[in-house]
Image (cartoon, helix red, strand yellow):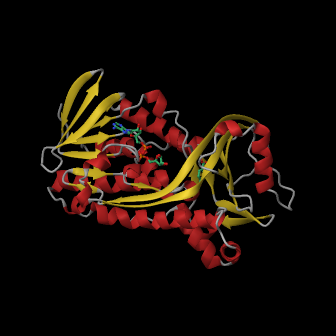
Amino acid sequence: MNTQVAIIGAGPAGLLLSHLLHLRGIESVVLESRTRADIESTIRAGVLEQGTMDILNEAGVGVRMRSEGALHHGIELAFGGKRHRIDLSELTGRAITVYAQHEVIKDLVAVRVAADAQLLFEVSDVSLHAIDSEQPSVRFKHGGEPQQLKADFVIGCDGFHGIARATIPDISRRDYQRIYPFGWFGILVESAQSSDELIYAQHDRGFALVSTRSPMVQRHYFQCDPKDEVANWSDDRIWSELHTRLENRDGWKLKEGKIFQKNIIGMRSFVSTPMQHGRLFLAGDSAHIVPPTGAKGMNLAVADVRLLSIALDEFYKKGQQDQLDTYTETALKRIWRAEHFSWWMTSLLHRFEDASPFQKELQRAELEYVISSRAASTVLAENYVGLPFV
Ligand code: APR
Ligand code: PHB
């Protein structure tokens, strides 16, 4: 099998890249280890930056996002028994859409399948070869049969646990990492919305987040021990913890409902550089991870593949590879900004077991500043809605 661009992984990064390349007349093959049903149902985050919405709309995959997603013009920060609104649109002229990542996946798979794309599910034993040469290849098994895919480029969109990053020799790679001493307990609930906007709450017992999936399904989280187990949390215990952390003096109350999904996620910040080696390029979670507090994960993946699609287009149309050569440098500017923002939001809102009274007062002072200074609110707002692409 031959193609122009071999893409490993059908997450948001891999699927969107194959579609953006298709729109520019560049052929690709996507290899995915899981089933279509599995990738279309895995629960992940759900906040799309303005720039992500624009890319999906321009690529013709924004129809359901526009009708079923919810446009939000603000978020709330809750602490000290009060809620404070950050007016994203007034501060930045931009907004966000709350639309689940697996819905984006469904839209992308549908558009790729409609275009007769080469999208292979349930592949196994994927390995990359000759990435230093002009004719790299990917070996894998599909339906039990060994296959070889030759391409001009291989793009690793295979997430944090994929194989692409490890193909870059250790001697050329540098990883930066911070693992947080807490995780998020996430629930999906059948209930009406409790709030028109997302609520990020700081509390002495730990962080909590009120989010949404649709008018009838809500997504909430609370900070927990990353080693804790779902089985330790009865529905009653979950509601009691959420009510305590979201307590306030203005009479607002979280609506309860039937909890139909519970999970615990660990939290890390991670960046691997360079994001390219020979004819192999990395995009999305394969190269970087952010804690979910800033809601940047999928947005960064989209920003990476936007750059790659432009650079590959320049290569195929003009025979130039300047933008491919500078991919790591260009991508890392946005990535490190988002890394800082996600780390900062996490530090602002979470309980750190080892925090001294001094550090706790600093955290409170920072929260007060963010809600009372227009300049500080704008810093949060412009990062949250996403900085413009350069
Ligand atoms: N071969 C083929 N596919 C693989 C392999 C492999 N060896 N390893 C992993 N995959 C697939 C996974 O099954 C998954 O579907 O690659 C895909 C990677 O998708 P994501 O993990 O969603 O990564 P990405 O597309 O970069 O999207 C980043 O997704 O994980 C969230 O929070 C993250 O929102 C962020 C976004
Ligand atoms: C979500 O709805 O899953 C969500 C929202 C905001 C975040 C993280 C996750 O910061």
Task: Note whether 113 is above or below 169 in the view shown.
Answer: above
Relative side of 161 to 267, left or right: left
In the foreground, 63 or 335: 335
Q: Quadrant of residue 29?
A: top left
**Percent coordinates x, y for residue 222 in the rendering:** 68, 51
Question: Is 132 left, or right, of 170 in this rendering?
Answer: left
**Visible residue check, residue 24:** no
Measuring from the top left, give residue 362's x and y in whole percent: 66, 76
Residue at image coords 48%, 53%: 297
Q: Identify whether 72 is placed above or below 361.
A: above
Percent across and percent down for residue 202 are 71, 62
Q: Position of residue 385 (x, y in %)?
A: 54, 61
Q: Residue furthest left?
A: 134
Q: Residue at x 30, y 54 (%)?
A: 308
Residue 278 visible? The answer is yes
Residue at image location 18% in from the left, 47% down from the top: 131
Q: Quadrant of the C terminus?
A: bottom left
The answer to whether residue 131 is left or right of residue 345 is: left
**Quarter where residue 5 is shown:** top left
> Which is more toward the observer, 53 or 281?
281
Q: Nearer the viewer, residue 45 or 350?
A: 350
Q: Is residue 322 left or right of residue 118?
A: left
Count the marks.
0
Q: Quadrant of the N terminus?
A: top left
Q: Quadrant of residue 90?
A: bottom right
